[in-house]
Amino acid sequence: MTTVAAYAAPAAKAPLERTTIERRAVGESDVLIDIKFAGICHSDIHQAREGWGEAIFPMVPGHEIAGVVAEVGPGVTKFKVGDRVGVGCMVDSCRECENCLRGEEQYCLNGMVGTYNAVGKDGEPTYGGYSEKIVVDENYVVRIPDGLSLDVAAPLLCAGITTYSPLRHWNAGPGKKVAIVGLGGLGHMAVKIAHAMGAEVTVLSQSLRKKDDGLKLGADHYHATSDPKTFEELAGTFDLIVSTVSAPMDFGALLSLLKVDGALVNVGAPEEPIALNLFSVIGGRKTLAGSMIGGIRETQEMLDFCAAHGIGAEIELISAAEVNEAYERVLASDVRYRFVIDTATI
C-alpha cells in the first residue's frame, strides 16, 4: 500500500479538501502512474453532489488522467517505466461478457468499474485522478502519443472519447452534416473531432456568445437555439446531432432538425427525466440514442487520431486549491473549455 495526497469530497455537496488515501500495492498486471494532470469533468460535479443518485464518500473525483508510468508489475507487457499514459472513466470490467470480449468494456454486462465512486473487485472503493498517483491494471491504461502534451491530453480521456465514439459510430465524415449542441468541455472537443473527420459542422448553442470560438475550433456554422428562427431555417438539415448538454432540452425541437434516418445522440446526461412526443421520431424514421465513453481499444484509436490531427483540449490550468471555485465556474459555464488540475500542486 502507498499513501498519497489527494483532494476529496468528504460528503455529498461538501467542498473538496486535501486529504490522504491508500493506493494498493502494485500487483502482477498493475501499472503505478505518477499523475501529472487531471481534467475536471461536469460528471465529477454530478457525482460529488449526488446529482445522479447515492454515491460513495469520501470521494476523490477525476477520470481524465494523464501521467507517467513509475512502476510496473512483473506480468506487465504493454508499458514500461517512463511511458506517457492515460486513464479514463473505467479501471476494470468483467472481461468475459459479450461486450467486454467485443472491446466495448464500457457496456460490460456485469458492470464496469468506474475510476472513482465505484467498488473494485477487491471490495475497496475506487479513487480518481485528483491525487498524486494511481494503480491501474495495464488492460485499462492507454498510451498518450508523443505528439500530445499531457496537459491538453488529459481531457481527451473523457471529453475526447465521449464525443469521438458517437461521431465514429454514426459515420461523421465528408458529405455528412453534423450539429453539436453546446460548446463546453464536451462540445468543443466534438467540434474539433467532427471537423477533423471531414464533416460539415454546425454548433447549436443557447446564444451567439461563443460564436467566434466555435468557428475557430472548426465549426462551419453557428446558430442560437434561443432564436425560434433557427428551428425554422434548419428543419430537416442534419444527418447527426450530438447533444453534449447536461440540462433538460426540447428534444422534439432538436429532432425536427434531423433528415430522414438522422440520429440525435445524447452524451450529456441531465439529472431529470425528459418528456417526448413519439411522433417526433416516428415522422422521419429518426433515432434518439445515447452513447457512453468508449472501450479501451477505441480510446487508444481516439488518442492516435487526435495526435495525428494536432487536436488537444482547450484548457485552463489550475492548482488543486482552486478546485471548488472551478466547480462553481463550470456550473456557470465560465470556462474555455476544460479545467485541468496540475497535480504537482496537491
Image: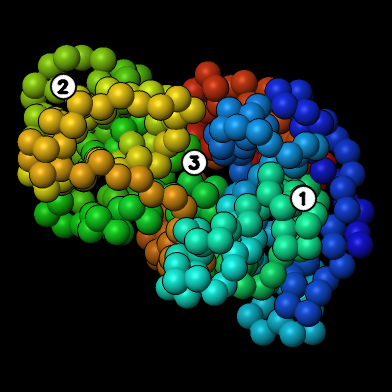
Label 3: few (<14), some or many (≥20) within 10 Å? many
User: What amino acid is found at the position of numbered circle 3 in the picture?
Assistant: Glu
Q: What whole-number distance in Å separates the C-alpha atoms at marks 3 and 2?
A: 27 Å
| Residue at image coords 60%, 49% | 64
Mark carried by residue 314? 3
Question: Can you identify the residue that label 1 sits on?
Answer: 125
Relative placement, left or right, of 184 versus 130 is: left
User: Taking 177 as reference, is 255 above or below it?
Assistant: above
Q: Nearer the viewer, residue 325 or 271?
A: 271
Mark carried by residue 230? 2
Q: Secondary structure at mark 2?
A: helix
Q: Secondary structure at mark 1?
A: loop
| Residue at image coords 45%, 67% | 99
Q: Secondary structure at mark 3?
A: loop
> Which of pointers 1 and 3 lies earlier in the amino acid sequence?
1
User: Taking 104 as reference, is 255 above or below it?
Assistant: above
Q: Nearer the viewer, residue 70 or 27?
A: 27
Q: Position of residue 192 (x, y in %)?
A: 35, 47
Mark carried by residue 294? none
Q: What whole-number distance in Å separates the C-alpha atoms at marks 1 and 3?
A: 31 Å
Relative placement, left or right, of 224 versus 321 is: left
